Image (cartoon, helix red, strand yellow):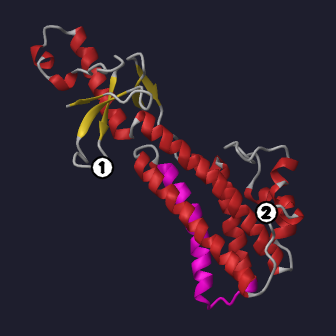
């Protein structure tokens, strides 16, 4: 259980994100398709002794595993979550280049974004009345059922069809992951990281106890027990940690209304 300070000064309780929640995210599900499709593509069409095979399979696996690790780290560190999500994004970009190289080196056609074949792959979720921007996309299906939707392309005898279909899925997964990364970044900027929220909640609890026991002089004399109001707008402050510059690593009070208000108070 964690707590955060609302704009009205109240302390709100929130449960930490449950572990394993990544399995229901559209980005993880799409990346699972990409990993499986890449594994079987390499097994069927490439020399198993080729270093490229290892690189492609590892890039596909990294994209999937880092989403899972990032989700599990989210409960305690937004920075770690962001770092792992960006690693997943980079791994998929590497894999995208590998499939584009495969087509180019063999003089095979690559589908244009507006080509009918590419549109058919992208329309699969919409045919089942699903929204790609919805994080619960296709969560009612098993991995095998989800694979079946794309089976005509991902098990095609023509390697060009398989490679192009995987490229379409990579673009879809990148779009989903970019949205996920942007959402985590906004949350981190607006609310601070987990450690800042935990420290603010601890200080808020001390302040609550101090008000309930006026006779406790030691608490009253400790300036860290009081959450100051913002000098610009008057709203409660939130304990934050400077990420860069000369003050990197030092804590300070930042306005809870950030980014609308950028008031700060030194500790």
Q: Name the quadrant containing residue 41.
A: bottom right
Is residue 70 a member of the stretch shown in magenta? Answer: yes
- Residue 23 visible here: yes
Q: Which residue is mark 2?
A: 113
Residue 199, percent from left and from top: 30, 33
Q: In the rendered image, which quarter is residue 165 located in?
A: bottom right
Which residue is drawn at the image coordinates 71% and 57% (left, top)? 172
Mark 1 and mark 2 lie on one chain; the one further toward the N terminus is: 2
Mark count: 2
Q: Is residue 28 left or right of residue 6?
A: right
Quadrant (top left, top right, bottom left, bottom right) of the N terminus: top left
Q: Is label 1 in contact with label 2 (beta carbons under 8 Å)?
A: no
Q: Which residue is mark 1?
A: 244
Measured as percent of width and height from the top left, residue 97 is found at 64, 74
Q: Position of residue 85 (x, y in %)?
A: 52, 56
Q: Considering depth in this image, is 213 or 67 the residue closer to the camera?
A: 67
Q: Which residues are magenta?
A: 45-72
Which residue occupies 61% across, 75% down? 57
In the image, residue 91 above or below residue 257:
below
């Amino acid at each position: 259980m964690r707590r955060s300070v609302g704009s009205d000064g109240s302390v709100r309780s929130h449960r930490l994100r449950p572990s394993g929640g990544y399995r229901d995210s559209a980005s993880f599900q799409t990346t699972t398709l990409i990993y499986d499709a890449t594994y079987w593509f390499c097994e069927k069409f490439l020399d198993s002794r080729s270093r490229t095979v290892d690189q492609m399979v590892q890039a596909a696996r990294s994209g999937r595993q880092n989403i899972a690790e990032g989700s599990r780290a989210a409960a305690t560190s937004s920075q770690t979550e962001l770092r792992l999500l960006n690693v997943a994004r980079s791994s998929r970009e590497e894999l995208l280049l590998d499939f584009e190289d495969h087509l180019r080196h063999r003089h095979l056609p690559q589908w244009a974004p507006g080509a009918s074949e590419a549109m058919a792959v992208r329309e699969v979720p919409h045919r089942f009345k699903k929204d790609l921007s919805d994080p619960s996309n296709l969560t009612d299906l098993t991995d095998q059922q989800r694979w079946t939707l794309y089976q005509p392309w991902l098990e095609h005898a023509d390697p060009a069809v398989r490679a192009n279909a995987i490229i379409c899925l990579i673009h879809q997964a990148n779009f989903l992951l970019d949205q996920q990364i942007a959402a985590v970044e906004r949350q981190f900027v607006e609310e601070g990281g987990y450690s800042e929220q935990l420290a603010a909640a601890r200080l808020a609890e001390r302040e609550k106890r101090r008000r309930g026991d006026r006779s406790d002089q030691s608490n009253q004399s400790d300036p860290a027990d009081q959450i100051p109001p913002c000098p610009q707008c008057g709203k409660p402050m939130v304990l934050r940690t400077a990420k860069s510059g000369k003050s990197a690593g030092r804590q300070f009070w930042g306005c809870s209304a950030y980014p609308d208000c950028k008031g700060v108070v030194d500790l």
